[in-house]
Amino acid sequence: MENNPKIAIYPGSFDPLTNGHVDIIERALKIFDKVIVSVMYNPKKNSLFSVQERVDMIQASIGKKANLEVDSFDGLLVDYTRIKNAVAIIRGMRAISDFENEFQMALMNRRLNRDVQTIFLMTGLRWIFTSSSIIKEVATFGGDITGMVPQPIKLKMLEKFPAKKEN
Ligand code: PNS
């Protein structure tokens, strides 16, 4: 590993990190020597948390591991893969609805950098229905997101959206 570690980047908005993301990180760690989870800018989305907040929330949720780095980058993903000497981009795939956008991004990234491969990992079935946006929507209206996000994320979400009191 020392000579030629296989590094993968797991990029995303992570606004916020969900248990589905954690599941993908754990799967990727079994395949690659090192995984870099990187908070990146998606121009199609408005974010709830700042980049630094998201980095801190990810770090607090997954803890320190020798083969895992949490980072952020403001620029093109393919440039970042070069900077980090990564051989792969990891993306989680849930349902068919994810496919079109993921396919388009993977092909564009391949066109921009032929040396990096996009690898899709499937989340566990229990996370198929979760997404940061649906979790944000539930939390906005005071719904319970327990078990869908790591505990540090739940606490940060509760700061933004206090839970509804039961009668
Ligand atoms: O979690 P998301 O929002 O689906 O992640 C999308 C993300 C952030 C990985 C994507 O928007 C991205 O790669 N942004 C960095 C800028 C870039 O390289 N855009 C071109 C993608 S083909």
Image (cartoon, rainbow, N blue to C red):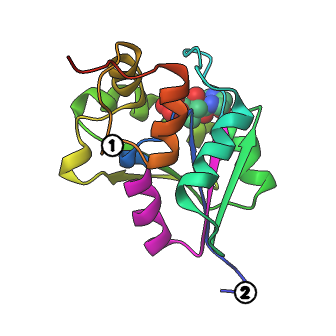
Pointer 1 or 2: first along the chain: 2
Q: Position of residue 15 (x, y in %)?
A: 53, 30
The mark found on residue 93 in the picture is: 1
Q: Position of residue 140 (x, y in %)?
A: 41, 15
| Residue placed most toward the observer, 149 or 158 | 158
Position above or below: 138 against 14? above
| Quarter placement of the C terminus | top left
Position above or below: 57 against 49? below
State the separation of the CA atoms marked 1 and 2: 30 Å
* Residues shaded magenta: 22-39
Left or right: residue 69 versus residue 119 is right
| Residue placed most toward the observer, 167 or 4 | 167
Q: Which residue lies at the image location 54% right of the left edge and 59% below the top edge?
A: 62
Q: Amino acid at mark 2?
A: Glu
Queried whether the magenta region covers residue 23, the answer comes back as yes
Can the viewer see residue 106 in this picture?
Answer: no
Q: Amino acid at mark 1?
A: Met
Label 1, secondary structure: give it: strand
Left or right: residue 109 versus residue 71 is left
Q: Position of residue 150 (x, y in %)?
A: 43, 48
| Residue placed most toward the observer, 57 or 158 | 158
The mark found on residue 2 in the picture is: 2
